[in-house]
Image: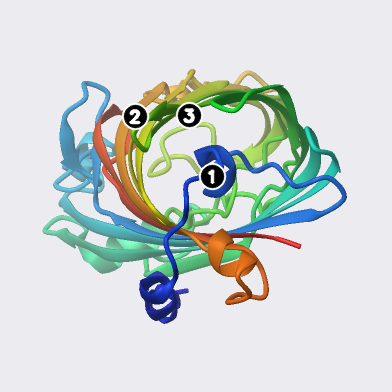
Amino acid sequence: MKILPHFTFLLLLMATAPAFADTLPAASGFALDGMAPAGRWAARLTLLQNGYDHKFDNDGRRVDLDKDYDGLDLSSLNPFLGGRLRLGTHVVTEYAELMLGYGLTEDLTLGAIVPYARTTTHVRFGVDGGIGTAGMKGVLTALGYKLPRTTAAAGPGDPTLGALWRFHKTERDSAILGLGVRFGVAKADDPDDLFDVPPGDGSTDLRLRAEYFRDLGQGFDLRLLGEYQIQLPDHVTARPGNPLTTATKERLKRDLGDYWESDVELGKRFGNWRVSATWHRYREATDRYWSAVGSDTRFLSTNTATLADQLRLGVSWSGIEAWRSGRLPLPLIVKLEVQDAARGRNFVGVRDVYLRISTFF
């Protein structure tokens, strides 16, 4: 899944399209609100690619992704092991998401979001001195783990069904409420693989969303977003303690922390084009686990309260005028964005590249 090659074929069309007369609000002209016209479908395909080998620790410092294990003296875990662990991982994610909505009325859209993800974890592993690399692999095998290696996990993520209701609309501004359920059906995390990253967390969530759009004049516009997701309790099979020392697996009760997301986006239109800058904040409460037999599960909850501030820069092109003039068979809106993690806590130091293609039919 490569984003830029998919984007290249659109550039010639964009360059030759006539100027957009700015007759539509930005929310509609650039498909910001996700609403479908009455009696018609709206579709949005999002492609994402990212990579990371750093993270923000519990104190907000940007550190190596493997800081907690790379260079670890194994005798601190077990005096019979000895040696110093060498660990380096680099994670690459390729993600696709299809959103489909149907306009029951001009202001009420029902829809679904269907994601798919592939995550590859590149692994360098070894032990200097002491038990050595071969000996440590033997220990991990005895604990029931798969051997350390570069691994890939792919599959459908957790889909969402929901509705968007536009409860306010004027020539200059509009506001939307959204309600949805994300169903936890993604493949579960493998407790025997230290390095796989599943395509979703498998938790069923309730999603509450509010968005506000306003045209500010002189081609400027504002978009505000707030979303709250309630992660419902469930059960997972996991190892309750430190993965390097825990051999037992249990069926644990899990309650992932609820989380909040917010966007403040400022856009500027130049005919058919729009550039934008977005400040995105993500905050998640601490995850909780419980064992029916009384095992200590604190390790799984440690440093799981998450905070991330991310800056996103984007450029969009609206093909609505080209569609109206017969140059396109469908109205097409394309948006390319790059997002960087500026600061955070217990969050990966990631750069995301998004390509979003929206249309109506």
Lower position in the chain sequence, tag 1 or tag 3: 1
Instruction: Where is residue 46? Give x, y as percent.
Output: 54, 58
Q: Is residue 195 visible?
A: yes
Q: Nearer the viewer, residue 222 or 244?
A: 222
Instruction: Where is residue 127? Give x, y as percent.
Output: 19, 59
Q: How far is mark 2 from mark 3, CA to CA?
A: 20 Å
Which kind of residue does numbered mark 1 sit on?
A: Thr
Q: Which residue is mark 2?
A: 308
Which class describes the residues within 10 Å of circle 2: few (<14), some (14-19), or many (20+)? Answer: many
Which kind of residue does numbered mark 2 sit on?
A: Ala
Q: Nearer the viewer, residue 317 or 287?
A: 317
The residue drawn where x is 77% and y is 47% is 37
Q: How far is mark 1 from mark 3, CA to CA?
A: 53 Å
Q: SS at mark 3?
A: helix
Q: Which residue is mark 3?
A: 300
The residue drawn where x is 37% and y is 69% is 149
Instruction: Where is residue 249? Give x, y as percent.
Output: 61, 41
The residue drawn where x is 69% and y is 57% is 43
Which class describes the residues within 10 Å of circle 1: few (<14), some (14-19), or many (20+)? Answer: few
Which callout, 2 or 3, points to the residue nearer the camera? 2
Is 131 on the left-hand or right-hand side of 223? left
Lower position in the chain sequence, tag 2 or tag 1: 1
Which kind of residue does numbered mark 3 sit on?
A: Leu
Which of the 4 quarters of the picture holds residue 162? Answer: top right
Q: Quadrant of the C terminus?
A: bottom right
Question: In the rendering, which numbered label is found on residue 23?
Answer: 1
How many numbered discs, if any? Answer: 3
Q: SS at mark 2?
A: strand
